[in-house]
Image (tube, rainbow, N blue to C red):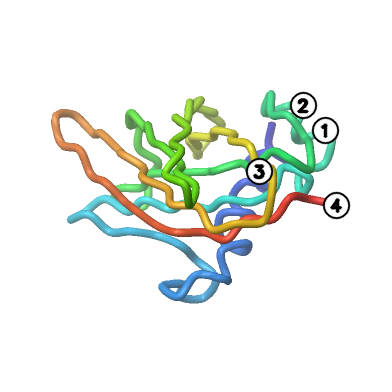
Amino acid sequence: MKRLGLFLITACLSVGVMAADVIKGERKEVFGDVTVHYNTFNSTFLTPDIAKGAELIRSKNQGVINVSVIKGGKPLIAQVSGTVKDLTSKTVPLSFRQITEPGAIYYVAQYPVDQQETRTFEIKVQIGDKINTLNFNQELFPGQ
């Protein structure tokens, strides 16, 4: 599982270079003393071993969203939920699973990517009774 964590951290910090709000390849939102790191990518970027270890489907028509929540430099347990919407306003709920490793907590979900298009993501991160929402657009491409 250590390889999974390393991959998800790398994916979270490097694939997001396309976003306008990226600083040093990192996509994040800061809510007070809590930082939410997030990224989305096609599941074909995962090696078969990592996909299997994370119980993710590796397919050219499947995307992955990876979210981590940090407070004071340490991973934080949260409730993560969200949706992804296409240009026709068809909304798909995201079913996040928590992956816990020594020193890291990740929340991952998959969604279909049938064609090239820009999608709108709405992610809710709940810590205690406080809910923080982040919204972003991402152009997606089916994998090769």
Which corner quadrant of the image does residue 141 belong to?
Answer: bottom right
**Marks 3 and 1, how far apart in space?**
22 Å
Contact, mark 1 vs mark 2 (Cβ under 8 Å): yes
Q: Which mark is residue 49?
A: 1
Contact, mark 3 vs mark 1 (Cβ under 8 Å): no
Neighbourhood count class around disc 2 (C-alpha, 10 Å): few under 14, some 14–19, many 20 upward:
few
Mark 4 or mark 3, which has the lower sequence index?
3
Neighbourhood count class around disc 3 (C-alpha, 10 Å): few under 14, some 14–19, many 20 upward:
many
Neighbourhood count class around disc 1 (C-alpha, 10 Å): few under 14, some 14–19, many 20 upward:
few
Q: Which of marks 1 and 4 is in front?
A: 4
Contact, mark 4 vs mark 3 (Cβ under 8 Å): no
- Residue 45 located left or right of residue 139: right
144 or 89, which is in the foreground?
89
Indicate the secondary structure of the residue bearing disc 1: helix
> Which residue was labeled with disc 2?
52
**Marks 4 and 3, how far apart in space?**
12 Å
Mark 3 or mark 2, which has the lower sequence index?
2
Indicate the secondary structure of the residue bearing disc 3: loop
- Residue 65 located left or right of residue 143: left
Q: Which mark is residue 144?
A: 4
- Residue 117 located left or right of residue 89: right
Q: Position of residue 103 (x, y in %)?
A: 50, 39
Which kind of residue does numbered mark 2 sit on? Answer: Lys
Mark 2 or mark 4, which has the lower sequence index?
2
Mark 1 or mark 4, which has the lower sequence index?
1
Residue under the image location 47 percent in, 33 percent down: 92
